[in-house]
Amino acid sequence: MTTKLPTGFGRLWTAQTVSSLGDGVTHAALPLLAVTLTRDPMALAVVTAAGTLPWLLFGVLGGALVDRWDRRRTMWVTDAARAVLLAVPAAAAALDVLSIPLLAASAFLLALGGLFFDTAATAYLPDLLRRDPALLQRANARLRGAQTAASGFAGPPAGSALLALGRSVPLLADAVSFALSALLVRSLPAVPRPAAGARESLLRQARAGAAYVFKDRLLLGLALRPAVGNVAFLAVETILALFAHERLGVGALGFGLLLTAEAAGGLLGAGIAAFLGRRLGTGTALTCTATIEGLAILGLASAPDAYAAGLALAVCGAGMGATMVLGPSLRQAIVPAHLMGRVASTSRMLAMCAAPFGAFLGGWLATTYDLRTPLYAAAGLLLAMTAVTSTMTSNRRVEAALRAARPPAGQDPAGELAVQTASG
């Protein structure tokens, strides 16, 4: 019998969808606003880099704080603060006093708020769903699909269109989305807070969370996949526009369609993730999706035209979409509640730290060799990572972790749904 998602999940889904739409608007508007102020590439890079710094500087510490705080309150206070924050650059734009330093500071603080909100939401969801792996996969698939549709499809064109109405309009629209999200999150049901442990320093708690990931082979395997994946995908993303123009002969519109194909694949992958988990087992499904990603990048490297490249990107997007549902769902099912924030933020920080290296690698390989070399290197990295982590995230190891995390008999509302591994 399939257990229904609780009513509170609908409000959380709506809040994150609204917020993702606003994020998509700002994601398009911030760089466009920066271009209206300067054409200096380094100044533009500062605005972009500012949005990645919080995860690099405060990722694990942020997770430790989330594990100390009430997670529902952390989410709605963070979104309310981001709504107020956006009023500052919006007012500056309306008064024609907007500057690159102000945009960079806004990007940094918005990303810092995102760190706390995302980590708290990741930790809140398994408590809301009683740590049921089947429900977590369904919930994460819906959240991932909505996020892709809102921030990937609807948000960026909306941001560009709103910018035409005035420089402050997209920022105000995002502020409204954060305010609505805060109101919805505040109405969510309360969940039990993790039991307070012994009084420890924040730094020691942060180290304990990171150590928990590195000492557990399953969690380490789950963390290595997005970390190595980000190196590969950023190497591809860095040269993709130039590859599309020089090798595939497509212009700006064609490049946008290629990205749309990838996003469409991501939606499909998120939608079928739970099915793959049931049919193959979570461990095998993760190995298959990672292999598909590597083979798809190989297909992109050898694509003879834009149609083949679009198909390869759609297949790669599908693998990524399924992976980003299966991996976090499994982590949420097996990590103790009092460590969830730190484990989630450690994994996210590893992925964020890997991204700049991937961008540099892609640029260097393309400059030293040719535009296809970063694609072949990325495919090699993905396939090598799959081979290394396949035993770390095997069905056997997944099943053992789920059994260990399952409450004693008579206390598990999920019953046999808690184990999703292939028979044999």
Image (cartoon, grey):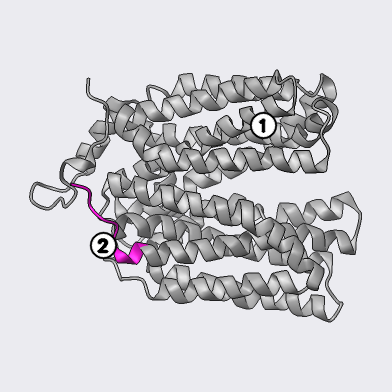
From the image, tell me which residue sits under label 1. Answer: 310
Q: Find the residue positioned furthest to the right.
A: 39
Left or right, 259 with respect to 273, comes to: right
Amino acid carrying mark 2 in the image = Ala
Left or right, 403 with respect to 201, comes to: left
**Predominant SS along the magenta part:** loop
Element class at badge 2:
loop
Q: Quadrant of residue 234?
A: top right
From the image, tell me which residue sits under label 2. Answer: 195
Residue 312 point in image, percent of width and height: 62, 27
Q: In this view, does 378 lie above or below 174?
A: above
Q: Is residue 350 above or below residue 22?
A: above
Asked if marks 2 and 1 touch (Cβ < 8 Å), the reply is: no
Per the rendered image, the range of residues in magenta is 1-9
Q: Quadrant of residue 281?
A: top left
* Label whose residue precedes the other's in the sequence (2 or 1): 2
Is 39 one of the magenta-colored residues?
A: no
Q: Callout 1: 10 Å neighbours few (<14), some, many (20+)?
A: many
Is 8 one of the magenta-colored residues?
A: yes
Task: Name the residue located 59 percent from the left edge and 62 percent from the top edge.
Answer: 21
Estimate the spatial distance between the alpha carbons at disc 2 and disc 1, rounded to whole Å.
49 Å
Q: Callout 2: 10 Å neighbours few (<14), some, many (20+)?
A: few
Q: Quadrant of the C terminus?
A: top left
Q: Which mark is residue 121?
A: none
Q: Is residue 1 visible?
A: yes
Task: Name the residue located 72 percent from the left edge and 24 percent from the top edge.
Answer: 374
Element class at badge 1:
helix
